[in-house]
Image (tube, rainbow, N blue to C red):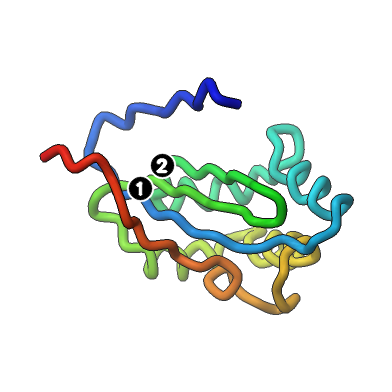
Amino acid sequence: MTQGYIQKDHGKRIKRYVQTMELKDNEELIHRYCEAHDEQHVRPEVLAGMREVGILEMELYRLGTQVVMIVDAPEDFDWDTAMAKLAQLPGQSDWEAYVAQFQQCNPTDTSDQKWKMMERIFRIYDK
């Protein structure tokens, strides 16, 4: 795991959003949550919705029950507008209901209620 992860070059300036949420403290549920996000199981309509609203890249990382989401989007991306649109696209509400069983949340919570935006407190301060 210490070798790092290769990142895409989007060829333009991007914005990065980082969010976190908690999974239920149950190894079987955590395994199923991770499996639902692997390449063989992730739902194509969910990926298509992300692309449709302008998301360039999304990654999830997990440590124990904590999940961190990193989203890269174009510089002119408006998070609130995009997420409101995404919630209305085919398959999205079904996906949110499905993954809620693994997440430390109310079953009817929206994505914005589950995920908490994180504040960047450091970067390498090159101009």
Does dot 1 land on a helix, a strand or a loop? strand
Residue 88 quadrant: bottom right
Residue at the location (55% across, 66% down)?
Answer: 115
Does dot 2 land on a helix, a strand or a loop? loop
Residue at the location (71% across, 56% down)?
Answer: 65
Residue 73 — which label? 1
Provide residue 64's location: percent of width, then percent of height: 71, 51
Q: Please, which residue is most extreme toward the top here?
A: 3
Labels 2 and 1 touching (C-beta < 8 A): yes
Q: Please, which residue is most extreme toward the right here?
A: 28
- Cα distance in 3D space between marks 2 and 1: 5 Å
Amino acid carrying label 1: it is Ala
Q: Is residue 122 above or below residue 24?
A: above
Residue 90 quadrant: bottom right
Out of 17 and 54, give the one closest to the viewer: 17
Taking 9 as reference, is 86 left or right? right
Q: Residues within 10 Å of mark 1 (few under 14, many from 20)?
A: many
Provide residue 92's location: percent of width, then percent of height: 63, 61
For the image, the number of numbered tags is 2
Residue at the location (37% across, 68% down)?
Answer: 81
Amino acid carrying label 2: it is Leu
Provide residue 94's location: percent of width, then percent of height: 72, 64
Provide residue 67's location: percent of width, then percent of height: 62, 53
- Give the quarter of the figure containing the N terminus: top right
- Give the quarter of the figure containing the C terminus: top left
Q: Is residue 82 above or below residue 63?
A: below
Residue at the location (70% across, 74% down)?
Answer: 105
- Which residue, given by chain and number where applicable, does mark 2 sit on? 56
